[in-house]
Image: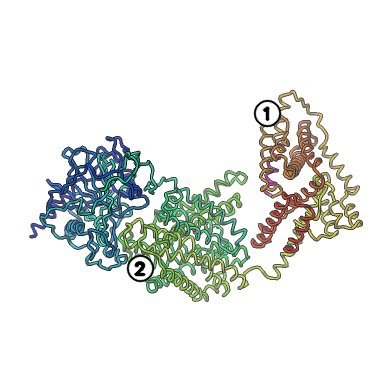
């Protein structure tokens, strides 16, 4: 008996060796699209056309061979009711094979049956005069021939050959599983099983157990042949389903672990049944000319697909899937299935390329019109499985960034209380649900799915360095150094305690069958806090520096420690699953923790010192390019630090980047040439990374809770939502408890603390970027390491369902309530004394605006104004006294050089002053005799209006013309910089697109004309750009004259260095004055009432812009808090929008004044 068994194993092994030996074998292809290892790359369906090692490979064909094309194709649902013709020309006969003549084999490509010296059926078809004999059966997981929008679970294909093998015929049956109580023909109503299929499965199970028994006694296999490296990688990446994985989905409960994979029974010498009538009752066939559906994809197959679906039981469904995905190669005794990442062994549908598709029915044609063979369309409605283009991945972050712009606009204008990242997470959730439920193959859906399935390590390397370095570099190093003992206490003992307690919650409260190691990984993920939303709030409300340091310092260090704990327990969990990792004991775990933490700190400090040295070398403080290089060096070193520490040295990349950032702050912050550029760059990086990451977290969470993601076997149902709330409540209690336990120590060391700050810090521990990244990374590793049917995918789906929900709850609940809590605890700068300080700033702003108004009304274009319009738009000057005006006039006179002083046009104040006060104000504005004398002396001394007679100037001389051209170009550059400065400061409203475009265009064209020897003539271009709109022309002329006058002053008193002006310099100034006179004609020809109203609005806009500059400087210098400054900016934006609304509506002056007064009284500030 033992001799017979050994002989059986030997024959079995020799049988499995045929056609599968190494690279170059015709059998070397897979249904797995992802590149597998080294330089071999993908050998999935999208690359079959490129497999040169397969002889006569036609997988890239399109009908070149005998008019045939590629298979499979999409079948039209119109054929359900439409028949072209009958079964004329068909003849079927039973085969002559006995069950004992058939070879039931399980290969890496699926389940097959082969015949020896017999056939299982004969077929004669209308397309050929030959007789075809069925000699091979293939059972595909996932139907290859699909209908519009519907893909059955399996497809059984019977391949027929002639005696010459020139052409083949295929008879195919589509298969689907249904519950037992669903009545269909040819199915046992007591078990739901298809009897004939069950006999075939029994034979395949016999083959399965032969290999299992062989490998039980030969764990390393036969050793006579080493399987190809591609399939070695596949063995590691894909696991088969395990017994009982579909237990919960089987309502009848008839399938148990004991009957999951029973041993097969001998089938005897009975004749194999008629394949054309025993599986389904065929009443219709769809026929077309195609090819084999696996390499070499030979185009010589007449396809005949039965209309009727073959129904099988869920038990049989499970057997087919398991037998296919659990194929074990006998030479290595390892899993070597070539199925796709979803467990399929099907080829995607191919293009029809105009081939005829004919639907034949047993009852004949039902078309009333004369029928001719129908040409199938070249494209179908079916969502064809395509290989995503690599560049699709760019679309998702671009779309999310644009979406973030819309979110930011809405939140800053209308809904101030909602955190930006929370809304993005919610929108990402909606995208995840939509993508999971989408049947479309648009590029955005594909791009989103690509990011949803991003590799875990790639995710961490992409997002964490940029987020962490910015936070570390922006710390106040001196406060951080003093509070290091406190933050270390929060980051290590408290994180370990929180991780352990949360793991116990997961182990004993949650109903999931999680291992202890997985529970600890879960606890570590939830221990990582994210202060992004709370930090912004603390800055806005002016929280104490100590509290800000504790929150940011804790977040940075506990991220590092949480990731160390996460890495250790993730490694143990993956080892449990058998898809990587390693076994780590307690002693080794302690050593690993010290290596990952202390080693990472050393790596980070080393890179930080290297970066500091690099910044020291780049010391040219007035070289703009070196500033750019310094900034680029910081981001390069940040990512390099993480890469060296994490993937290369297997340490904590987070701690390394944090130490690098802190070291750079300590030793190199003073070496930064352009601090503003550095700060703005890292703010931009943080914004982009947070935008994409939080939205991505929402996408993955949406896919989990949608219960529609085909990559996840388990559903996130009602009870899961309940346990999510339970975890949130217990997590909050745990955090408060830990701070309560350690408070006696924290309050006595370092920066110390008080109970109010501890309460806020406990509540403000939001879960965000790092936790989301870790959860996605773990989920991605398990998804990529298992097949679709593996029940262990449920673990990470459940984990991410809880983690994503916790992030959303903390962002919305804690993030929104943090502001009121901070105020309630009295930790913000909102006291009565602070309000008195801000009131002083209001007075400063009023004085500043008055001074700016006095300066502005010295310009000619502001000679006629309506003060009522100005004061109603600029409410800070709505109540002014004669004393305020005199003070402002004196200040302007004293601060303006005498030769540049223009007496203001004070006529606008007549409506609010008595005649006596107005006369007094005019006297104050006029220069006194000694002031005029001083100005005359300055002009005579500097001689700026006298021509330098020593220099000859001849317009016919090339040298003189070249000098004149260069001076004109200098003046053009002064205009360009003047326009840019005025636009940045708001003096020129950038929302007036036509005005801005015309000014920029005039400078560009003037530069070109001057370069060709023409004089400055830029007003003509400006005037043509705004058409006949008088208000736009007035605003354009005002901006044009203003910048020309400023350019003249700079050109005359700063650029021209000699004591006298040359004739060429005066020529340039005269050309500018000529352009000013052209622009002034707009004011001279405009109706005085329209001019008065328009320039009153224009002055209001200029004063509001000046107020914005004043407030920005106060916020930048720290005199105003961000929240206080934001309040002012909102007022300014509201006033500017009000001006924009009424300026171009042509509202009657009296109506406007009444409307403005109503608004002012309803909202005076």
Query: Is 628 left, or right, of 1012 in this rendering?
Result: left
The residue that label 1 is drawn on is 1012
Q: Which residues are magenta?
A: 970-984
Q: Nearer the viewer, residue 313 or 407?
A: 313
As displayed, is residue 813 above or below residue 1126? below
As displayed, is residue 832 above or below residue 1156? below
Q: Is residue 982 part of the magenta span, yes or no? A: yes
Can you tell which quarter of the image residue 1058 is in? top right
- Please give the name of the residue rendered at 22% of the width and 62% of the height, measured from the top-left corner: 188
The residue that label 2 is drawn on is 514
Q: Nearer the viewer, residue 48 or 521?
A: 48
SS for callout 2: loop
Q: Nearer the viewer, residue 788 or 542?
A: 788
Residue 591 visible? The answer is no
Task: Report the predominant secondary structure element of the magenta stretch.
Answer: helix
Query: Is 267 left, or right, of 376 in this rendering?
Result: left
Question: Which label belongs to residue 132?
Answer: none
Q: Position of residue 672 (x, y in %)?
A: 58, 51
Q: Position of residue 291 (x, y in %)?
A: 27, 41
């Amino acid at each position: 008996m033992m001799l017979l068994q050994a002989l059986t194993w030997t024959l079995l092994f020799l049988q499995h060796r045929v056609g599968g030996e190494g690279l170059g074998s015709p059998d070397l292809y897979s249904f797995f699209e992802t590149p597998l290892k080294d330089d071999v790359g993908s050998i999935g369906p999208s690359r079959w056309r490129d497999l040169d090692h397969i002889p006569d490979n036609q997988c890239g064909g399109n009908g070149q061979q005998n008019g045939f094309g590629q298979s499979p194709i999409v079948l039209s649902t119109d054929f359900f009711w439409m028949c072209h013709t009958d079964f004329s020309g068909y003849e079927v006969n039973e085969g002559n094979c006995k069950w004992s003549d058939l070879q039931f084999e399980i290969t890496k490509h699926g389940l097959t049956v082969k015949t020896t010296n017999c056939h299982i059926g004969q077929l004669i078809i209308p397309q050929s005069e030959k007789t075809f004999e069925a000699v091979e059966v293939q059972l595909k997981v996932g139907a290859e021939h699909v209908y519009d929008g519907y893909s059955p679970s399996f497809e059984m294909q019977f391949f027929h050959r002639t005696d010459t093998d020139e052409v083949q015929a295929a008879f195919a049956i589509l298969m689907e599983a249904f519950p037992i109580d669903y009545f269909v023909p040819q199915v046992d109503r007591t078990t739901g099983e298809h009897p004939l299929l069950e006999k075939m499965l029994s034979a395949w199970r016999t083959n399965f157990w032969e290999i299992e028994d062989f490998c039980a006694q030969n764990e390393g296999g036969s050793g006579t042949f080493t399987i190809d490296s591609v399939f070695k990688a596949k063995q590691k990446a894909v696991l088969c389903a395990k017994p009982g994985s579909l237990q919960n989905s089987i309502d009848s409960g008839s399938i148990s672990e004991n009957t999951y994979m029973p041993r097969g029974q001998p089938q005897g010498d009975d004749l194999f049944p008629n394949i054309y009538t025993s599986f389904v009752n065929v009443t219709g066939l769809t026929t077309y000319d195609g090819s084999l559906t696996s390499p070499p994809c030979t185009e010589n197959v007449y396809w005949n697909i039965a209309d009727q679906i073959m129904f099988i039981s869920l038990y049989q469904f499970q057997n087919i899937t398991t037998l296919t995905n659990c194929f074990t190669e006998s030479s290595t005794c390892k899993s070597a299935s070539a199925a796709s990442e979803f467990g399929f062994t099907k080829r995607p549908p191919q293009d029809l390329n105009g081939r005829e598709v004919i639907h034949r029915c047993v009852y004949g044609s039902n078309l009333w019109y004369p029928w001719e063979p129908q040409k199938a369309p070249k494209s179908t409605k079916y969502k064809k499985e395509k290989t995503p283009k690599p560049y699709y991945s760019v679309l998702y972050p671009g779309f999310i960034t644009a979406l973030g712009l819309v979110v930011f606009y809405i939140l800053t204008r209308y809904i101030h209380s909602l955190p930006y990242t929370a809304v993005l997470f919610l929108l990402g959730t909606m995208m995840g649900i939509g993508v999971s439920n989408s049947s479309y193959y648009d590029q955005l859906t594909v791009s989103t799915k690509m990011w949803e399935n991003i590799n875990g390590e790639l995710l961490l390397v992409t997002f964490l360095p940029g987020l962490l370095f910015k936070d570390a570099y922006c710390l106040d190093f001196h406060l951080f150094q003093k509070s290091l003992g406190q933050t270390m206490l929060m980051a290590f003992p408290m994180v370990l305690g929180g991780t352990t307690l949360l793991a116990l919650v997961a182990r004993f409260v949650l109903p999931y069958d999680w291992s202890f190691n997985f529970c600890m990984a879960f606890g570590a993920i939830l221990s990582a806090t994210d202060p992004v939303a709370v930090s912004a709030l603390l800055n806005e409300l002016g929280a104490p520096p100590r509290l800000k340091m504790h929150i940011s310092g804790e977040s940075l260090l506990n991220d590092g420690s949480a990731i160390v704990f996460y890495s250790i327990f993730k490694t143990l969990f993956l080892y449990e699953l058998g898809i990587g990792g390693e076994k780590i004991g307690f002693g080794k775990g302690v050593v690993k923790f010290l290596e990952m933490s202390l080693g990472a700190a050393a790596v980070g400090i080393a890179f930080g010192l290297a970066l500091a040295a690099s910044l020291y070398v780049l010391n040219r403080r007035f070289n703009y390019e070196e500033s750019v290089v310094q900034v680029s060096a910081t981001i390069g070193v940040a990512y390099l630090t993480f890469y060296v520490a994490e993937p290369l040295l297997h340490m904590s990349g987070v701690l390394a980047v944090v130490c690098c950032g802190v070291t750079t702050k300590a030793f190199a912050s003073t070496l930064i040439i352009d601090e503003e550029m550095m700060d703005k760059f890292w703010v931009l990086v943080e914004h982009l990374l947070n935008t994409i990451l939080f939205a991505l977290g929402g996408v993955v969470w949406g896919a989990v809770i949608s219960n529609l993601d085909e990559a996840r076997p388990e559903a996130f149902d009602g009870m899961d939502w309940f346990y999510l709330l339970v975890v949130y409540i217990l997590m909050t209690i745990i955090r408060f408890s830990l701070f309560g336990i350690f408070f006696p120590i924290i309050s006595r060391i370092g920066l110390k603390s008080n109970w109010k700050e501890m309460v806020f810090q406990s509540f403000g521990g939001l879960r965000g970027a790092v936790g989301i990244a870790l959860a996605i990374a773990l989920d991605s590793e398990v998804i990529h390491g298992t097949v679709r049917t593996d029940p262990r995918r449920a673990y990470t789906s459940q984990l991410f369902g809880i983690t994503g929900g916790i992030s959303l709850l903390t962002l919305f609940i804690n993030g929104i309530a943090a502001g009121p809590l901070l105020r309630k605890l009295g930790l913000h700068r909102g006291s009565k004394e602070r309000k008195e300080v801000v009131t002083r700033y209001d007075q400063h702003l009023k004085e500043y605006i008055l001074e700016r108004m006095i300066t502005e009304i010295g310009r000619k274009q502001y000679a006629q104004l309506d003060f009522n319009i100005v004061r109603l738009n600029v409410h800070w000057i709505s109540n002014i006294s004669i004393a305020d005006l005199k003070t402002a006039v004196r200040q302007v006179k004293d601060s303006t050089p005498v030769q540049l002083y223009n007496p203001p046009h004070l006529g606008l104040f007549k409506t609010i002053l008595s005649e006596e006060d107005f006369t007094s104000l005019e006297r104050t504005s006029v220069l006194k005799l000694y002031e005029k004398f001083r100005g005359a002396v300055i002009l005579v001394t500097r001689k700026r209006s006298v021509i330098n007679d020593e220099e000859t100037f001849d317009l016919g001389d090339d040298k003189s013309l070249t000098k004149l051209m260069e001076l004109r170009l200098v003046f053009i550059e002064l205009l360009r910089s003047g326009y840019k400065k005025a636009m940045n400061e708001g003096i020129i409203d950038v929302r007036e697109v036509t005005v801005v475009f015309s000014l920029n265009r005039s400078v560009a064209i003037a530069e070109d004309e001057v370069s060709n020897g023409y004089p400055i003539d830029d007003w003509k271009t400006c005037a043509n750009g705004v058409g006949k709109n008088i208000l736009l022309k007035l605003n354009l002329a005002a901006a044009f004259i203003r910048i020309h006058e400023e350019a003249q002053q700079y050109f005359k008193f700063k650029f021209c260095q000699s004591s006298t002006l040359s004739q060429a310099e005066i020529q340039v100034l005269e050309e500018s004055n000529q352009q000013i006179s052209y622009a002034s004609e707009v004011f001279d020809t405009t109706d005085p009432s329209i001019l008065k109203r328009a320039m009153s609005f224009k002055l209001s806009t200029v004063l509001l812009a000046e107020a914005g500059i004043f407030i920005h400087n106060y916020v930048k210098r720290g005199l105003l808090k961000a929240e206080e400054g934001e309040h002012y900016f909102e007022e300014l934006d509201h006033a500017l929008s009000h001006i924009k609304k009424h300026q171009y509506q042509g509202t009657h002056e009296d109506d406007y004044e009444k409307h403005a007064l109503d608004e002012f009284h309803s909202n005076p500030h």
